[in-house]
């Protein structure tokens, strides 16, 4: 396509071509931005869904860890305290077993907290591409 000087026609492949008006160009830009925003919103939905799945799994692990710590270890702790009470005073036996059970529970809570630390509530990829889109749109308007 050759660009002509004032008074000349624009031509593509030897045929006259009409230059699009500013309104048409702005219309195309608006349409393209709309399509881009819809794509970005879909990307954000996908990212948020993935992060919610991670959070759900981490919460499930915390819940399961708490339940197991409560039910299973309560029985084991009682049996251990009774067994230890055969060797030392019952009060000391139950205190020692209680401290051990508390330490196990603390480890499970720390593991669950670490898993929750991996969850990103903000869709970082979408935020970054939205920033790039805004820069692109500003460049198109200039």
Image (spheres, rainbow, N blue to C red):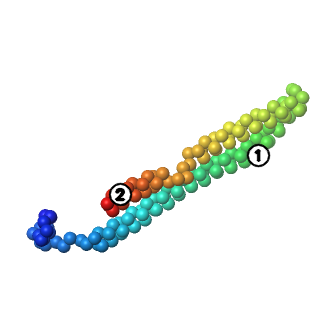
Q: Which mark is residue 47?
A: none
Which of 132 and 75 lies nearest the eye of the viewer? 132
Q: How far, Cα to Cα, is label 2 from label 1? A: 58 Å
**Which residue sits at x=63%, y=41%?**
111
For disc 2, the neighbor class at 10 Å (few under 14, some 14 to 19, many from 20) is few
Residue 131 coordinates in the image, percent (x, y): 42, 54
Residue 68 coordinates in the image, percent (x, y): 72, 45
Q: Quadrant of residue 21?
A: bottom left
Which of 76 and 131 lies nearest the eye of the viewer? 131
Which residue position is annotated with label 2? 136
Residue 44 coordinates in the image, percent (x, y): 48, 58
Q: Is residue 35 left or right of residue 85?
A: left
Residue 49 coordinates in the image, percent (x, y): 53, 57
Q: Which mark is residue 71?
A: 1
Q: Is residue 79 above or below residue 37?
A: above
Instruction: Please identify the residue farthest to the front as the structure is shown.
Output: 6
**Which residue sits at x=52%, y=56%?**
48
Q: Is residue 101 above or below residue 14?
A: above
């Amino acid at each position: 396509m050759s660009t002509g000087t004032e008074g000349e026609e624009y031509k593509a492949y030897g045929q006259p071509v009409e230059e699009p008006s500013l309104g048409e160009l702005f219309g195309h830009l608006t349409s393209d931005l709309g399509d881009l925003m819809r794509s970005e919103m879909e990307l954000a939905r996908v990212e948020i869904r993935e992060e919610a799945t991670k959070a759900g799994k981490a919460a499930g692990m915390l819940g399961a860890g708490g339940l197991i710590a409560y039910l299973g270890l309560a029985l084991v702790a009682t049996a251990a305290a009774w067994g230890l009470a055969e060797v030392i005073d019952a009060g000391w036996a139950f205190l020692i077993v209680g401290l051990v059970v508390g330490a196990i529970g603390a480890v499970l809570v720390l593991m669950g907290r670490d898993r929750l630390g991996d969850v990103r509530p903000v869709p970082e990829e979408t935020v970054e591409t939205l920033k790039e889109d805004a820069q692109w749109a500003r460049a198109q308007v200039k």
